[in-house]
Amino acid sequence: MIALLAAAALAASVRQLYFTSGAVFSAVVEPASRVVLNFPNLGPLAAMFVGPGQNVRRGEVLAQQSITAAVSSVASDHAVLAADRQRLSALARGVPATPATLAEAHAQISRDLATLSAAQSQLNSLRLVSPINGLVVAVGGTVGDLVGSQGVSAGADPAVQVPTSPSSAFFPPAPSSNISSSSPQNPPLLTIDSLGSWVVVAQVPEGDIARVTRARRARVTIDPLGGRPLVAHLRRIVPSPVLVGGSTYYDAVFVLARSRAGLLPGMTANLVIGR
């Protein structure tokens, strides 16, 4: 037992030396996943059911465009389908029908089902549904704004929200000869962060990328929370260079092995990579 305790103490000492003697990088805490939601087709926003800071469930309707005509169309198609099914049933119960008559009745029901499916799809496209359990962190528009696949139409006054862009980029990419600058995009209608799992993103100089890749793990201290360091494992190196003052950096994304109460997106952290 004494030998086992001594071995455990030695292992802990080696791990501590491994981390504290390594390179330290400033980092930020981010949710493990972030989704932005927009309507597939352009149209005015008729209703918004959620706001920033609200928890949502997967499958929950968050917003919708005008659905009056679509609901009417679905109801009408249901009625047509029911009537044609009654006709087919009457044919089966009454005077024996010819095979051609029965075939046409079945074909009509197939057409009814296709029409109803298209109408239901149109109705579904007018409702924005959450794909995950998460937290609404930004709403880019208000009722009456023109919204579509490109987000909230330019010219609309966006609601005052937290930034919709992840804070994983400490410095914006600098223009270069092989990178064309794009025009600013419209804000997405909704931005949702996942709950319960977190990543830590550090901006690493290109000279340290190989070292980070070899290490595969890091010790993380969350500055606003203090306390005991957390262990994180490398998920990926983002292959998108960030140019700052003639130097090139890359985002290294580490997954926290355990969550911790009080974590919020954008919190600062220190990430230590071992030798």
Image: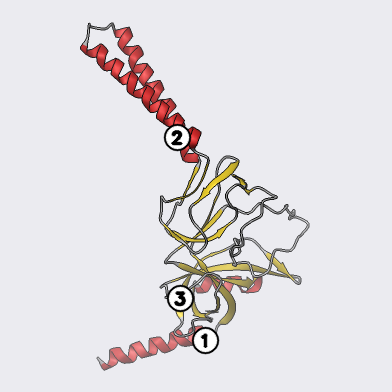
Residue 41 is drawn in which quadrant? top right
Q: Residue at x 56, y 60 (%)?
A: 138
Residue 275 on image: x %, y %:
54, 81
Residue 113 lies, with reference to residue 56, above or below; the image says: above
SS of the residue under disc 2? helix
Rendered image: mark on residue 20: 1
N-term mark: 3 or 2: 2
**Nearer to us: label 3 or label 2:** 2
Q: Residue furthest bottom?
A: 2
Identify residue for label 2: 71
Residue 6 is drawn in which quadrant? bottom left
**Nearer to us: label 3 or label 1:** 3
Q: Is residue 118 visible?
A: no
N-term mark: 3 or 1: 1
In the foreground, 120 or 184: 120
Mark 3 vs 1: CB contact within 8 A: no
Q: Residue at x 49, y 56 (%)?
A: 50
Query: Which amino acid lies under the numbered mark 2 shown in the image of this protein?
Result: Val
Residue 49 on image: x %, y %:
48, 53
In the foreground, 195 or 129: 129
Identify residue for label 3: 262
Residue 146 lies, with reference to residue 8, above or below; the image says: above
Q: Is residue 97 left or right of residue 270?
A: left
Q: Residue at x 46, y 35 (%)?
A: 121
SS of the residue under disc 3? loop
Residue 233 on image: x %, y %:
47, 71
Query: Which amino acid lies under the numbered mark 1 shown in the image of this protein?
Result: Thr
Query: Which amino acid lies under the numbered mark 3 shown in the image of this protein?
Result: Gly
Q: Is residue 163 left or right of residue 246?
A: left
Residue 177 is drawn in which quadrant? bottom right
Q: Counting other residues with Cα less than 10 Å from the Cα at mark 2, is it few (<14), some (14-19), or many (20 or more)?
A: some
